[in-house]
Image (tube, rainbow, N blue to C red):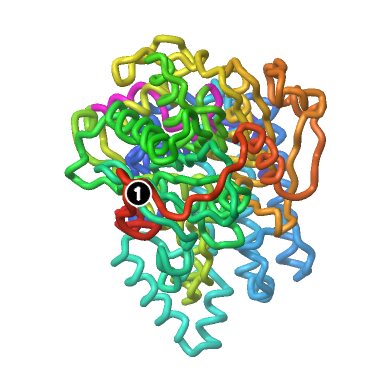
Amino acid sequence: MNFEPSWTQAAQQMQETLGAGLTQAISSLGAGTAPGFPAMDLSVFKTLAPSQPSITFEPSKLLELQQRYIAGASAIWNQGLQATDAAVVAPDRRFSDPAWQASPVSKFLASAYQLNASTLMGLAEAVESDAKTKARLRFAVEQWMAASAPSNFLALNAEAQKKAIETKGESIARGLANMLHDMKQGHVSMTDESIFEVGKNVATTEGAVVFENEFFQLLEYKALTDKVYEKPFLMVPPCINKFYILDLQPENSLIRYATAQGHRTFVMSWRNPDQSMSAKTWDDYIENAPIKAIEVVREITGADTINALGFCVGGTILGTALSVLAARGEKPVESVTLLTSLLDFSDTGILDIFIDETSVKYREAEMGKGGLLKGKELASTFSFLRPNDLVWNYVVGNYLKGETPPPFDLLYWNSDSTNLPGPFYAWYLRNTYFENNLIKPGKTVVCGEKVDLGKLDMPFYIYGSREDHIVPIGGAYASTQVLPGKKRFVMGASGHIAGVINPPAKKKRSYWTNDKLASSRTSGDKYPAAQDDWQKDATEHAGSWWPDWSEWLQGHAGKQIAAPKTYGSRKYKAIEPAPGRYVKVKA
């Protein structure tokens, strides 16, 4: 007798099962809650799926998946019968401890889970639909499978059970204490946060606050050279994070590096918004933050023009501000550096799955006239873009194993979240991620001026990270097609943060430049339309991109003059030591 279901029956069952499972997963995500862990909020981009997708499959792919699943299931079954140590699925660090192999039940659970996970991902790929729907399905399946892994549950985690026995229950007691601690602080601990304190062992480069308003504090850093370049240097960090990602430790501080290269360095430290700022708009931020910072830096230094850098959202904010100034007939910035920034939002990577008319209208109705986007919402969303690494890894370690994560300055910064004013966020969501209006000349009006990025004809140094999942390399590269002047595009290895914070002394990673466009330092050569075409002729260089950038920036910094002996000026006196009060305010 043949017990194997017919192809038609199997296909129908698989389609019905996936349709129900994916709809449940998407509905869970759309409701704003991560599957399996209610404390994690994903509502920052509600609603992911306003309606249930119609799911159909490409028959040949479905048949191939069915055959592969049957073969995999047979191999797992035979493995159990023969008590062999041979692995039948790809290695997975979640199940790498010998305890998983020591127990036949645990070994079966891990193998069956991996087979089911790979099959579900294959089914999502087999769906016949548009690219955005398929991306949403992949994301939903990834979240669902990450949350349902047997390693996430004490009753199924062989490694955690072994540790509980070895410690006579102490690991369970510590895990409960860790869970209570994290519930109190409102987020899962990624590092031992008690080790760090802003201003004491992170953000320690010497400087002073020389200006402040309700939006930001302006920090000036102490010169580390006898002479400085005559054109001062202003950094605009993202307002969705704290600025000290650029100043974690002396050995990996981009702020200290710029200062050591002879630049009179100023940095904006954004205020962490509270209810008093809940009605602030994108226009309020542009006029009262970057535009004001540029004005104050010029007044303090007496320079006609300055050099400026924008990092991530800071680059979008800086580009908008410079467009407003250009519309007013002002060009106070000599050159601009963009680090993992988006001006053209055509390629936003995984974040695109959260954006549609329904989700944007929801946010506009919820907070477009006032309110705050809580920092924990943003932090949770970005963490769930890499759920196994940034969520469940710590759930298992902290709670099931009772471990205290080791101290790591980058993860401490990552947990130090910031709020955003609702109107600011709603405008940003619609005009950048959804409608991509900044690249449409005159489409948006900011601070009473029509935005036209085509008027930004100053030299640009544009950096993108190859494995960036927040600002995809194609999105960073797209700025070369928008900006009309002299440009230098550089691609670094690694991701959104690790690619940027890559000091030369570490001698790690690499970066790429296009030698055929090397003259773009001075001539503004036309860049290929696609980043892939640029990369065909690119040359890889070992180590950090920082020296390449430093050489470029020096070419726009003017002559060297005596370094200032005091902070600020007669009008703008030092208010308090860096890093200032604003950065220490918790969300």
Q: Quadrant of residue 584?
A: bottom left
In the picture, measured across the screen, residue 417 lies left or right of residue 204, that is left
Residues rendered magenta in the picture: 345-364
Give the residue at the far top of this rendering: 442
Check if residue 352 falls in the magenta segment.
Answer: yes
In the picture, measured across the screen, residue 236 lies left or right of residue 96, that is left
Check if residue 338 falls in the magenta segment.
Answer: no
Residue sitting nearer the eye, 290 or 70: 290
Q: Is residue 122 visible?
A: no
Question: What secondary structure prevails in the magenta region?
Answer: helix
Q: Is residue 202 visible?
A: yes
Residue sitting nearer the eye, 342 or 22: 342
Residue sitting nearer the eye, 469 or 559: 559
Q: Which residue is mark 1?
A: 210
Instruction: Give SS at disc 1.
Output: strand
Residue 431 drawn at (x, y percent): 38, 21
Mark 1 crowdedness (10 Å alpha carbons): few <14, some 14-19, many ≥20: many
Residue 285 drawn at (x, y percent): 31, 33
Residue sitting nearer the eye, 187 or 238: 238
